[in-house]
């Protein structure tokens, strides 16, 4: 049984306006010049999804959202449904990012409901898990991430394409990264949980690493056992950095 292709996804967070599309032009030129060994996706703010999707149409670059609401429609001021992301041209969606878990109190059950919504809309979810520094220091890393993996991935995902992203909260935007041994240990625990939940299918789900991935550390991280790609924040905003990361594979 072959594994899914690795996935390198850029999470632009709350960065990006019309002028940022120039960077995307350079990213498109890079993938056209040298087709990457991985899938490449950009997850811009929702306001840019349709423009970015139009720009990358027909190229190898995919487009994703950064969050969605579980409901398909309704009186939820400011929220965006999975169907709206798909309608705008997204094919993936990041769910359960730690900035949403911590900043908006999103728990595993809500994230699982959002994953069901993503499937309903035909989107491929990228579900994030990761421990805080306090949890790591308390020796709780593996129990936290396996608990989040179990709780945030609904049974409905069986047989569907999805990804898990391991993002230690303390490594996000800090320039700090776990050792390669720590990454391998976390990814092995997530893999075991995926196999427990999804059987053989669970062996093939890509497990992305995220947290201060940059051109200088991408190659060694991407070659670490059970690392099936990367979820890249700051370094995905600039074409020169992002292309260096997906060309590292
Ligand atoms: P940085 O790459 O900026 O550390 O962000 C990682 C992240 O949160 C991606 O979702």
Image (cartoon, rainbow, N blue to C red):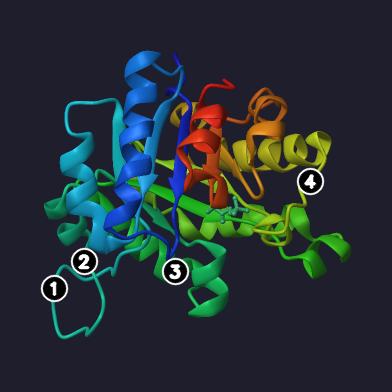
Q: CA distance from mark 1 to mark 4?
A: 40 Å
Disc 1 on helix, strand or loop?
A: loop
Q: Residues within 10 Å of mark 2 (few under 14, many from 20)?
A: many
Rendered location of residue 164, percent (x, y): 51, 44
Tag 4 residue: 178
Q: Is residue 209 above or below residue 3?
A: below
Q: Position of residue 197 (x, y in %)?
A: 50, 43
Q: Circle 3 sits on which residue? A: 109
Which is more foreground, mark 2 or mark 3? 2
Can you tell which mark lies on residue 81? 2
Q: Which sits earlier in the primary sequence, circle 2 or circle 3?
A: 2
Q: Which numbered disc, 4 or 3, marks the residue that appears first in the sequence? A: 3
Q: Are marks 2 and 3 in contact (CB under 8 Å)?
A: no
Q: Nearer the viewer, residue 157 or 3?
A: 3
Instruction: Describe the element under mark 4 as helix, strand or loop.
Output: loop
Q: CA distance from mark 4 to mark 3?
A: 27 Å
Front residue of 198/224: it is: 224
Residue at the location (73% across, 52% down)? Answer: 175
Left or right of 219? Residue 176 is right
**What residue is drawn where x is 57% and y is 75%?**
102
Asked whether the beta carbons under mark 2 and mark 1 sit within 8 Å of each other, the answer is yes
Q: What is the distance, in whole Å, between disc 2 and disc 4 at their CAs?
A: 34 Å
From this viewpoint, is residue 114 visible? yes
From this viewpoint, is residue 160 visible? Answer: no
Quadrant in the picture for residue 145:
bottom right
Q: Mark 1 — residue?
A: 73
Is 78 above or below relative to 231? below
Q: Nearer the viewer, residue 153 or 218?
A: 218
- Answer whether labels 3 and 1 touch (C-beta < 8 Å): no
| Of the image marks 2 and 1, the number of the one nearer the N terminus | 1
Q: Is residue 233 above or below residue 161?
A: below
| Label 4 vs label 3, nearer the camera | 4
């Amino acid at each position: 049984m072959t594994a899914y292709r690795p996935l390198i996804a850029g999470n632009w967070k709350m960065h990006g306006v019309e002028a940022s599309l120039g960077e995307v032009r350079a990213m498109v030129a890079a993938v056209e010049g040298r087709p990457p060994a991985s899938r490449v996706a950009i997850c811009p703010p929702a306001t840019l999804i349709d423009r970015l999707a139009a720009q990358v149409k027909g190229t190898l670059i995919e487009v994703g959202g950064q969050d969605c609401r579980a409901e398909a429609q309704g009186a939820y001021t400011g929220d965006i449904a999975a169907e709206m992301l798909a309608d705008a041209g997204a094919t993936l969606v990041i769910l359960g990012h730690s900035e949403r878990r911590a900043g908006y109190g999103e728990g595993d059950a809500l994230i699982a409901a959002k994953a069901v919504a993503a499937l309903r809309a035909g989107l491929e979810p990228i579900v994030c898990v990761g421990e805080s520094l306090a949890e790591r220091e308390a020796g709780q890393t593996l129990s936290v991430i396996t608990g989040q993996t179990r709780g945030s991935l609904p049974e409905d995902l069986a047989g569907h394409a999805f990804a898990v992203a391991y993002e230690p909260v303390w490594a996000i935007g800090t320039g700090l990264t776990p050792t390669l041994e720590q990454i391998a240990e976390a990814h092995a625990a997530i893999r075991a949980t995926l196999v427990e939940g999804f059987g053989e299918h669970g062996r093939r789900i890509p497990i992305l690493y995220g947290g201060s991935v940059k051109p200088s550390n991408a190659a060694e991280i991407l070659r670490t056992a059970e690392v099936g790609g990367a979820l890249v924040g700051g370094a995905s905003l600039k074409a020169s950095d992002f292309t260096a990361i997906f060309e590292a594979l």
